[in-house]
Image: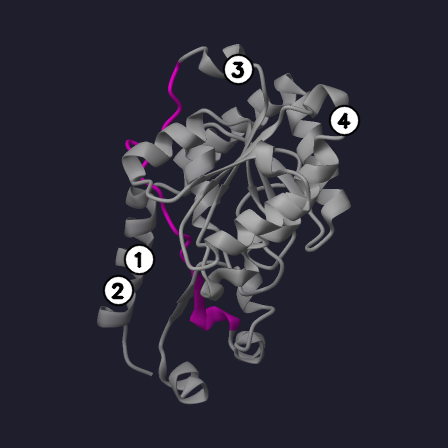
Amino acid sequence: FLPLLARAAKIITCASLDYIKHSDLRKYYQAKPDKFRQISFGVNIEQFFACQTDMNKQRPNKVILFVGGLDKAHYFKGLENLLKALAIIIKTAELSLTVLKVVGRGDLLPYYKDYALDFGVKKNVEFYENVDNGKLVDFYNYCDCLVMPSINKAEAFGLVLLEAMACSRPVVASNLPGVRSVFKNGREGLLVRPGDTNDLACKIKIILRDGKLAESMGAAGRALVENKYTWIKVGKKLNSIYHYVRYSPKA
């Protein structure tokens, strides 16, 4: 049905034009780029925000956060690679106490727990299954960075990146179509080569070791969200498209 829908649609919306250019719709985009409109996902900045406390400074250890589904449908989230990267990170003396907090649930949870054990990082990993949005804000606030190590194009955007940035946290994400367009590499966070655990560990260590850089990236992330990713701004864009489709002359 995709060819029929693509030809019949007056406008095709997407979260990222970068992703479209590398998807099954790329030939339709190349033929009629004006038909496509980018409308990013949004985040509630009143719900996700930075708590002004000194708890992070008082922590004796660094905290890495992963948020994502732990079921077979979300195999592409790349948690295995993050666990491997953690094994590399904790070999550095100053980062030996680093903790990875994994927020998510699914039928692969036992598998990931065994994986952590096999790679010798079990004592450095904490799993949290039932976390609602109210509690999720706390996880974002009391970490040093959010990591999204997705391995392939099944990951098209990454809403967790917006939530973390809204909470003034730096992000580390795979350099994938769509994902890489969410933020600017080096400003709000760092991009890594998909599937490269050494690069992943290296980029995470850069943030964990440089508090000023992390703080600067976190502030830039919040500013980006306020400027581009609020639901009000996203809603206005969507509303204007509906208006255009309804009231513009038929071809």
Amino acid on which the number 4 mark rests in the picture = Thr
> Badge 4: how crowded within 10 Å, few (<14), some, or many (20+)?
few
Please state which of residues 22 and 248 is positioned toward the viewer in this rendering: 22
Of the numbered discs 3 and 1, the one sitting upstream in the chain is: 3
What range is drawn magenta here? Answer: 33-52
3D distance between C-alphas at marks 2 and 1:
6 Å
Q: Are marks 1 and 4 in contact (CB under 8 Å)?
A: no
**In this picture, residue 24 sits left or right of residue 208:** left
Query: Which residue is rendered at x = 64% and y = 22% of the image?
Result: 213
For disc 3, the neighbor class at 10 Å (few under 14, some 14 to 19, many from 20) is: few
- Identify the residue position indicated by label 4 in the image: 92
| Viewer-nearest of discs 2 and 4 | 4
> If you read the primary sequence from the N terminus, does the residue marked by circle 3 or circle 2 appear first?
3
Q: Amino acid at mark 3?
A: Arg
Q: Quadrant of the C terminus?
A: bottom left
The circle on residue 242 is 2
Element marked by disc 3: loop
- Report if residue 249 lies within the magenta region: no
Q: Are marks 2 and 4 in contact (CB under 8 Å)?
A: no
Tell whether label 1 touches label 2 (CB within 8 Å): yes
Residue 159 visible in the current orientation: yes
